[in-house]
Amino acid sequence: MGKKVKKESEPFSKDVFDPLPIESKTAATAVLMLSSPEEEVLAKACEAIHKFAEKGDENKTSLMCLGAVEPLSRLISHEDKTVRRNAVMALGVMASNNEVKKCLKKLDVIPAVISKLSPEENVVVHEFATLCLTSLSADFCYKVQIFEHKGLEPLIQLLSSPDPDVKKNSVECIFNLVQDFQNRAAVQQLNGLPPLLELLHSEFPVIQQLALRTIENITTDSETRVAFRNVQGFDRILEILGTKEFSDLHEGALRVISNCLEDSESMQLIQTMGGLEQLLQFVGTTTLPEAQANAVKAVARMAQSGENRKILHERNVEKTLTDLLMQENESVRTAACQAVATVSKNLSSRDTFRSLDAIKPIVQLLNSEGSELRMAAAEALSSLTNDNNLNAYAIHEAEGDKLLVRQLRDSCMGAAVYAASVLTNMASQEELRRSILAHEAMPALVALLHCTDNNILISATQAVASLACDAEARMELRNVGGLSPLVQLLKSINAEIRRNASWAISVCANDEITALELCNAGALEILQEITLSPNRNNKFSELALQKLLDSNLSLKYSLTGHLSASNITTDGFYDPGQIRMGHQVPTLEEISKQVVNNHRATIAVNGKPLDQFIAKEPDDCKQDSPTETTASSVLSSKRSSKTPSKMKGKGNKEDEKRKDEDEYKPQPEIVVDEAWSLPYDAAFHNLVKEAVESISPLQDVVKMYTALAMLVCDAMGGQVEAEKLHDFLWELHISELKFEACSNIVLIGKIKKGTYFHRALLYKVLADRIGLSCSLIRGEYNRAWNEIFITSPKKTFAVTDTL
C-alpha cells in the first residue's frame, strides 16, 4: 500500500477554504458572529441568541451588554429570509426586557419592525414582530412612533391571521395603543371594529378578553360608538351577556354597554332589542359579584338621562336596587348606592325608594368600614333628600342625622361632602335642624371651613347657612370660632365658595351680636370690596352687605345715604357724613379723640340719661330701651380700627333677651366704661317726651306727621324763607357747639339752627320713637329729606318732606 498521489488531471485551488464546523459555548461568541458576512453563520447565531434569550430576563440583559441589540436591529431587515426570521425572533424575545427597550429607543427600530408585518412575510415573522411591538407599545414614546409610522393598520389586518399567536400579539398591541386617545379614533377609522368583534368568538379566552377590553376602551369615543351600533356590536355583546359559558366575559361586556349608554341612540337601540329587560334581569340573577356590580353601574350610566330615568322607573328599577342594598358584597352595595343616587334624580323614584323602605339600609351603610361605600351611601341620601322632606324625616327616624354628623369628620373627603349636602337638605325642617345641632354638627362644620378642598368648602358653607337660621345655632357658631373662617372664605377665588359664604353671612347677620362679630372679623370691608368688583359681585354678597349694614344703621346711612322705614334708629346712632363705599367709617370713640377741626360735625343721638345705664334690675334696663345698650358696649369701640361700633338694629329675638338676662344675673349693676361715653342729650330727651305727649294721642296719621314736622321745624330754628337763607348762620352755630363741647361730635338736641340734613335726621329719629313710618335719604349739597307713605280711604300716596 503506497501513499496516495494526486492525479495531475484533478484541479487544485488554493483560494478555497474548507468548511470549518465551530461549536461555541459562550454567548459572546454568538454575538461576535452577528458581524459575519456569511448568511448561514448569521442565521445560526441569531437562532442561538433567540434560544439563549428565552431562558430568562438575565440572559437578555447579558446579551444587551455584549452588544447584541444593535446588530439584531440591522439583521431584521436582512435580504436573506432565514436570517431575517431568526433575527426577528431573537429581537422579539429580547424586547420584553426594560433595558433592551431603552437601548432600542436610540436605534429607531420601529419602522423596520412594522415593515415585517407585511403579507409577504411568513407567520413566524408576524408572530415575533407583533410580539416585539406588544412589548414596546406599553411605553408612551413607542405608542407615538407606532402611530406616526402607520403601524396600526397592519396590526388590524393581522387580527384575521390564521395563527392564534399572531392574533393574540396583535390584539394585545392594539389594546396597549388605544390607551392613547388618538389611536382610539384611528381604530374605528381603519375599520377595526369588525375583526375585534370576531375575536369574541375565539376559542382562546385570552384573545377574547383582550378583544373585549380593547372594545371597552375604544367605545369611550363617541364616533366609535356610532360605528359600534352600525356593525351590530350590541348583538354580539348581548349574546355574550346571555350565554352562561361566557361568564368570564360578562363583566367586560357590561362595561362596554355602560360606555355605549351615554348616547340616547344606543339607549333606544337597546330598548328595541330587549336589552334593557335583559340587563335588569341580569342584575337580579347573576351570582358573580363583579359582574353584578358592573351591571348596576350600567344601569346608573343609563339613568344619567332624564328620559331614561322615566323608562327605568316604569320598569320598577327601584325594587331591584333596593334588593341589592342587602347584598354582602361591598362592591355591589357601593354600585347600588351610586345607582340610587342617579335614579333618584327622578322625583317619583325618590318617593318609591321611601315606600320600599330603602332609606334605612342606606343609612346603616354609613357605618361601613369601606370609605367608598360610606361615600356612596351619603351620595344616595343626598339625592333622596333633595327637595323631599318626607325622605329627610325618614333619615331622621333611622337615626341618620347622628351618623351624618359623624361622617363630617370622615377621613374620606367625598363622604364629608355628601354628608354636609344631606344635612343641608334636612335643615329646612326646624325639628330636624334642632336634632342635627344637638349632635354637634356646628363644630364639625367649622372644622371643615379650614379645609383647602373646594368641594368640601362649598358643601360646608351651604350647611352652615342652612343651620344658622336659629339663634341658638348662631350662638354656637360664634362660640366655636366659626365666624372668622367664614369671613375669610369671602376672599376665595372660587365663585361658588364666595357665594355660599356670603349667603351664610347674610343669615348670621340676622342678630346684632353675630353681625357685630362678623364686622369685627372684617366682613364689612371685604363685602364692600366684592360689591365694587364687577367680576366678584353677586346677589348673595349684596344681600350679606345689606344685612350687616342693617345691623349698624350709622354705617348704613354713612355709606349708602339711605335708611328705610324699617331701619329703626336708637340711642347711639350718629351721622359722620357721606363716606364712599370701601372706605372706613370711624367710630364715635375714634371721632371723640380727634382734635377739633373745620370738617363737618358728626351728629349724634343719645336721649337716655346716664343713670339709666346703672340699674339694679336687669329687666328694667331691658325695658327702658329696645337696645339694652350700655355706655361701654354701645358707645365705646370694642373692635379693631376697621370695624363699626356696636349698634342695635331692628328688634331683638326673645331668646337673645333670655341670654342677655342670664349674662346680667351674676352682677346686679352694669359698669359704665369710664374711659369714654357719649354725653346725655337732655334737649333731645325732652323733644322725645314732647312728641310722645303731644303727637302720639292724635288719631289722624296726616296730622301726626304734620305735627312732628312742626315740632322739628321749631326745634331747628323755625321756617326760613329761601331768600333769607344767607342770614341763617347754621354753620357758625354748629362751629360754636363744637367749640363749646371741645369735640367734633354735636348732640342733635343741642342744634337750634339746623339746615336740611339736620332737620331730616331729627325727623327720622323722633318718628322712630313714636312709631311713625319714615325713611331718611341723603342728597347733595347738604340736602336730605324724609319720605312717608300715607294711606287714605281712596288711595295710597307718598309724601316727600324736605322740611
Image: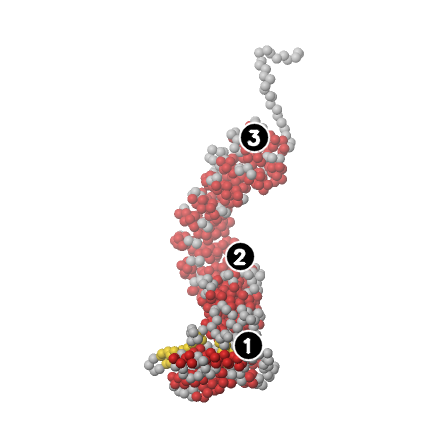
Q: Earlier in the sequence, mark 2 or mark 1?
A: 2
For disc 2, the neighbor class at 10 Å (few under 14, some 14 to 19, many from 20) is some
Residue type, mark 1 in image: Ser
Is any part of residue 675 visible from this angle?
Answer: yes
Q: Residue at x 50, y 44 (%)?
A: 177
Q: Earlier in the sequence, mark 3 or mark 2?
A: 3
Return the x and y of residue 664 as percentages of the image width and height: 58, 81
* Between 392 and 533, the one nearer to me in the picture: 533
* Between 511 and 406, the one nearer to me in the picture: 511
Residue that mark 3 sits on = 43
Q: Quadrant of residue 278?
A: bottom left
Q: Residue at x 52, y 78 (%)?
A: 745
Residue that mark 1 sits on = 592
Residue type, mark 3 in image: Ala
Rounded to the nearest whole Å, what is the CA distance between mark 2 and mark 1? 70 Å
Q: How is the image coloured?
A: secondary structure
Mark 1: secondary structure: helix
Q: Which image quadrant: the N terminus?
A: top right
For disc 3, the neighbor class at 10 Å (few under 14, some 14 to 19, many from 20) is many
Mark 3: secondary structure: helix
> Residue 712 vs residue 327: left or right?
left
- Does residue 309 sit above or below 691 in this rendering? above
Q: Earlier in the sequence, mark 1 or mark 3?
A: 3
Residue 19 numbered tag: none
Residue that mark 2 sits on = 331
Callout in the foreground (2, 1): 1
